[in-house]
Amino acid sequence: MMLGIAILLFAAALATAQLRSVTTPSWDRMTRFVPSVSEDENSVTREERSLALFRRFLNLLDPSFATIEPLLRSLGVNSTQWLTVIQAGRIAGAFFAGLATAALAGALILNPVLKFAVVLPAFAGFILGVNKLIRITSLNRRRLIRRELILGIEIFCIFLEGGQSLDQTFRSFCEICGKALPYLAHIQRTLVAEIDNGLSYEKAIAHWADNLGIDEGRELSILFTDSLVHGTELVPHLRQFSADMVEQRISGARASIGVKSSQLTVVMVLFFLPAILTFLTAPAFTAVASALGVSR
């Protein structure tokens, strides 16, 4: 129990530090220009080392987090501190779930071996439940991003064909997407803000692809970067890219229809077939039963 409380307190401290860094961007900008108020490099290094050691300890307790971390990054959680907070919170919640199960088992089960045997399934069940929730959320976001990206690429092509540069296209798309493309709108605003803050186009576009969290985003970032560096024509490649995404969605829909058809066949065999057989054979059985009754 003390270990779970310690992990939870450490996660809360990290979350507080992360929120402070998010809510005070002006102070962070000042520390870049004023050496007297900037953090000592040695202290930063020590914090990074302690955080890395703590993450290694958490990975020993929960090795499954390595498969969940990419899903969290696809949801927009890219900060190492926030990833550590989520990982520590999962483990602390699993400890509390195990303790609650042990307390409940102590009141209901008399065998001491069984009391401790139910703790591990509760711990693993909590971890697996959180992992399943994160995976479902990530897949749903990716599906929505892909659906909006097809329309977004068409809008990009319209702006580019209208004579706008890639930078102007980013800004125009950010202005019009709004409520029509809610998932892309936030990502696009982040891209424009990073460009306005002086970040290079290559890094800003790479961050944009990371925020999308889908494989298609990497390919689009390569197209944008090549257009900026080498001046290649972008519209034909975007048109082909959009057509490929539409074809992939159609193929996925066909595969889903095939799965639904097989599932419906199983349901029909289990529930409809016995009723149909009963309906067809009932008159014959009734006639035979009536004939046997008369003959007697």
Image (cartoon, helix red, strand yellow):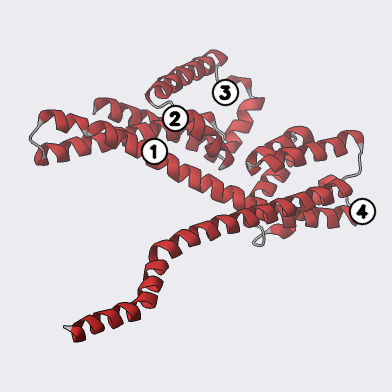
Q: Can you say whether 56 is above or below 210 in the image? A: above
Screen quadrant of the C terminus: bottom left
The secondary structure type at the circle numbered 1 is: helix
Please tell me which residue lies in front, 234 or 36.
234
Kindly identify which residue carries mark 1. 128
Q: Within 10 Å of the Cα at label 3, are there few (<14), some (14-19), or many (20+) other Cα atoms?
A: few
The type of residue carrying mark 1 is: Leu
The secondary structure type at the circle numbered 3 is: helix
Q: Within 10 Å of the Cα at label 4, are there few (<14), some (14-19), or many (20+) other Cα atoms?
A: few
Q: Are marks 2 and 4 in contact (CB under 8 Å)?
A: no
Kindly identify which residue carries mark 2. 64
Q: CA distance from mark 3 to mark 1?
A: 44 Å
Q: Are marks 4 and 3 in contact (CB under 8 Å)?
A: no
Q: Can you say whether 290 is above or below 245 in the image? A: below
Q: Which residue sits furthest left?
A: 110
Residue occupying the point 73% across, 57% down = 151
